[in-house]
Amino acid sequence: QVQLVESGGGLVQAGGSLRLSCAASGRPFSTYNMGWFRQAPGKEREFVARISWSGSSTYYTDSVKGRFTISRDNAKNTVYLQMNSLKPEDTAVYYCAAGPIGSEYQYWGQGTQVTVSS
């Protein structure tokens, strides 16, 4: 089992920045690929970014490329999502997820709200 706790959400004006954190506990963090997802009101949950277990590989959905950066610190069992140049359409509940190497995401956090005002 892996427990995930997100933090860092809040209210920010368009063009501003936030950094989300996801602290993991349980099984060795470094054996999991990590991802960030988001769900806006009335919409399905969508993929935002992912990072490999070692941190050597990252991938982003097109709408956040160049604005968001995913990173991880395996010594601190934490994954981050740096969000810059935020837009109102980034407003959503953001979730982090963990998946064993070679498997789908199996563990999810409770989510943190990000609201971007215009």
Image: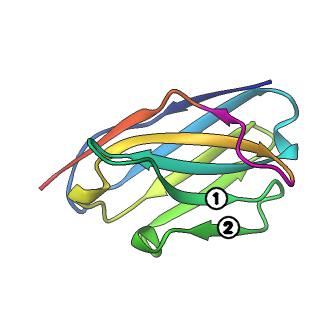
Res 16 label: none
Comparing 90 with 107, the one in front is 107
- State if disc 1 and disc 2 touch (CB < 8 Å): yes
Residue 90 is left or right of residue 19, and the answer is: left
For image coordinates 47% across by 32% down, the residue present is 111
Q: Earlier in the sequence, mark 2 or mark 1?
A: 1
Residue 34's place in the image compared with 24, above or below, is below
For image coordinates 88% across by 34% down, the residue present is 28
For image coordinates 86% across by 55% down, the residue present is 102
Separation (CA) of disc 2 from disc 1: 6 Å
Q: Which residue is mark 1?
A: 50
> Magenta stretch mostly in which secondary structure?
loop
Span highlighted in magenta in the image: 102-108
Q: Which residue is mark 2?
A: 58
Residue found farthest to the left: 118
Residue 94's place in the image compared with 54, above or below, is above
Circle 2 packing at 10 Å, graded few (<14), some (14-19), many (20+), is some
Dot 2: what SS?
strand
Q: Residue 82: x percent and y percent?
A: 49, 55
Dot 1: what SS?
strand
| Residue 104 among those drawn in magenta | yes
Q: Residue 104: x percent and y percent?
A: 74, 48
| Residue 93 among those drawn in magenta | no
For image coordinates 63% across by 51% down, the residue present is 35
Q: Amino acid at mark 1?
A: Arg
Residue 58's place in the image compared with 6, above or below, is below
Q: Residue 115: x percent and y percent?
A: 26, 43
Residue 73 is left or right of residue 116, and the answer is: right
